[in-house]
Amino acid sequence: MAKIEIYTTAFCPYCDRARALLTKRGANFEEFDAPHGSQARKDAIARSGGRTTVPQIFINGQAIGGSDDLVALDRAGKLDALLAG
């Protein structure tokens, strides 16, 4: 199973959507609380190449993007292969 990391904040509908999709796919993931100004948020920005929004999702260390990007991978039929990796 792939190593999945997701940086989120409280009260974030996009974060909720990403968590729900990963859970629906049976994926285990490590979640980091990354409110504005926190070290976790700074880490997410650095790891994602400067993206400042949440969630930021990483699969096996690769920056996937946010919730919309995750959903797009799923709709394209590419998410399951990434999660299996």
Image: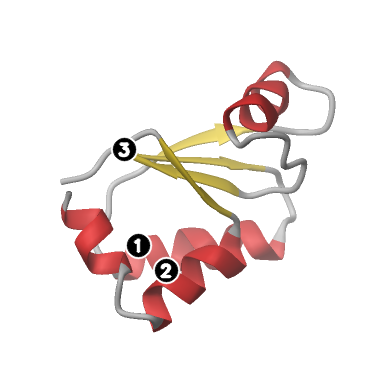
**Tags 3 and 1 touching, CB below 8 Å:** no
The relative height of residue 48 versus residue 20 in the rendered view (above or below) is: above
- The residue to which callout 1 is attached is 23
**Tags 3 and 2 touching, CB below 8 Å:** no
- The residue to which callout 3 is attached is 60
Which numbered mark, 3 or 1, is in the foreground of this view?
Answer: 3
**Tags 1 and 2 touching, CB below 8 Å:** yes
Give the residue type at disc 2: Leu
Q: Residue at x 42, y 68 (%)?
A: 21
Q: Residue at x 77, y 41 (%)?
A: 52
Which sits earlier in the primary sequence, circle 3 or circle 1?
Answer: 1
Q: Residue furthest front?
A: 49
Real-space CA distance between mark 1 and mark 2, rounded to the nearest whole angstrom: 5 Å
Residue 22 sits in quarter: bottom left
Residue 26 sits in quarter: bottom left
The relative height of residue 78 versus residue 50 in the rendered view (above or below) is: below
- Could you say whether the residue bearing mark 2 is in a helix, strand or loop? helix
Give the residue type at disc 3: Asn
Q: Residue at x 70, y 43 (%)?
A: 9
